[in-house]
Image (spheres, helix red, strand yellow):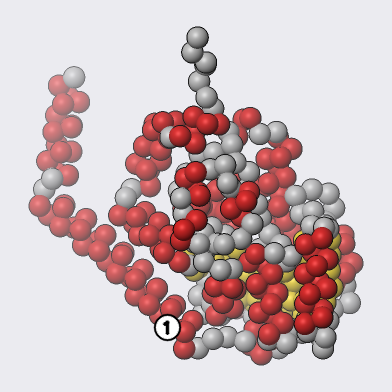
Amino acid sequence: MDSITSVAAMFGSVLYHPWFVTAMWVVGSASVLAYLILLFFQVFFDTLMPINLKQKYNAEWALVTGASSGIGKAIVEKLCEQNTNVVLVALDNDLLHNTFDEVSAKYPKLKFIKVGCDLSQGDYMTPIIDATKDIDVQLVFNNAGFITAGMFHKISLGRNLGNFECNATSCIKITHHFVNRILDAKLKGYIGFTSSSAGFVPNPLSAMYASTKAFLTLFATSLAPEVRSLGIDVVVVHPSPMATNFFDEASSLSALMAFKKFAAGPSVIADVLFNSAGRFVVRDQGTVSILFRLVMKAFDMNLFCELTARFAHMSGDHQKFNPGPKKE
């Protein structure tokens, strides 16, 4: 016991030593300052030097997953404005058909291909490969994703695995296929990923969503240095809450709904994805994502995880999804 006390005392003396406190303050301040400087340059380029992807990559075709609504539809619209043909990949429903008809009528000089498939299950790569075998797709936007709210163990395994397949595994398959196609054709290319600031921290009651988004970010940032010298740029964006169908799926989580008032239009994310091409790899978009990033620079991640594990069960959302035994 005496040895434990002495170690604790020694640790305490170091922790509160003026030199240690000063060093930690300097390191923390430098990290925040570096982030804010990068953020300034990102906003500067977005505002004053927008990018036309068709011109930058001499691209005729782009592919967008989750293309029928929200961010995906905004990406499709921006591609059309830059005179680029688009392959729309989404669930085979009225949303996809209506979006396809809408852009086809609005941009009659462009070509469109629709691929109705479910990225959460089945052999979705076959229809995607078949639809694109005779064209050169140089711009790929891995945007599709959804959230499943609730206790992980109470959600069916099939639903959890489907969530993982759509949010993460499909991006691996699609990216692998088109990176090889781009390289085989000796063309330049661009791969974009729609991640989320949910991947910054533990997210109880949406474990699959947060973990898949964390994976996407690390996958994209690891892939970027591999293919940049080969002529392919990679960008991953962490949107703040968007005014999209996402909130319909997340409506059972009051903690997430609290951010709805900060929601911006999906066209903002399309702009960030386009204007980062070849300039930046990682983008935090909007107030919520930037604040999350700054908080995690000031707050130790390991400590945050420990506190979340111990106190998350006290939240109203947790009690709603996992109520205790009824009182007689």
**Dot 1 amino acid type:** Phe
Q: Secondary structure at mark 1?
A: helix
Residue 228 shows in this picture: no
Left or right placement of residue 87 versus residue 314 in this view: right
Q: Residue at x 50, y 62 (%)?
A: 263
The quadrant in which residue 94 appears is bottom right
Residue at 50% x, 49% y: name it.
256
Name the residue tied to disc 1.
44
* Above or below: residue 258 compared with residue 139: above
Q: In the image, residue 235 lies at what x, y percent?
A: 57, 70
Residue 283 in the image: above or below residue 50: above
Q: Picture coordinates of residue 99 (x, y %)?
A: 77, 69
Task: Please state, as top left, top right, bottom left or bottom right, where the N terminus lies in the image.
Answer: top left
Identified at 12% across, 41% down, the residue is 13
Answer left or right for 272 relative to 231.
Answer: left
* 4 shown above or below 236: above
**Residue that protrudes farthest toward the top in the picture:** 328
Residue 222 lies, in percent from the top left, at 56, 63
Residue 267 at what x, y percent from top left? Answer: 59, 73
Give residue 322's quadrant in the image. top right
Assess disc 1: are there few (<14), some (14-19) or many (≥20) residues with their C-alpha within 10 Å of its C-alpha: few
Q: Residue at x 40, y 80 (%)?
A: 41
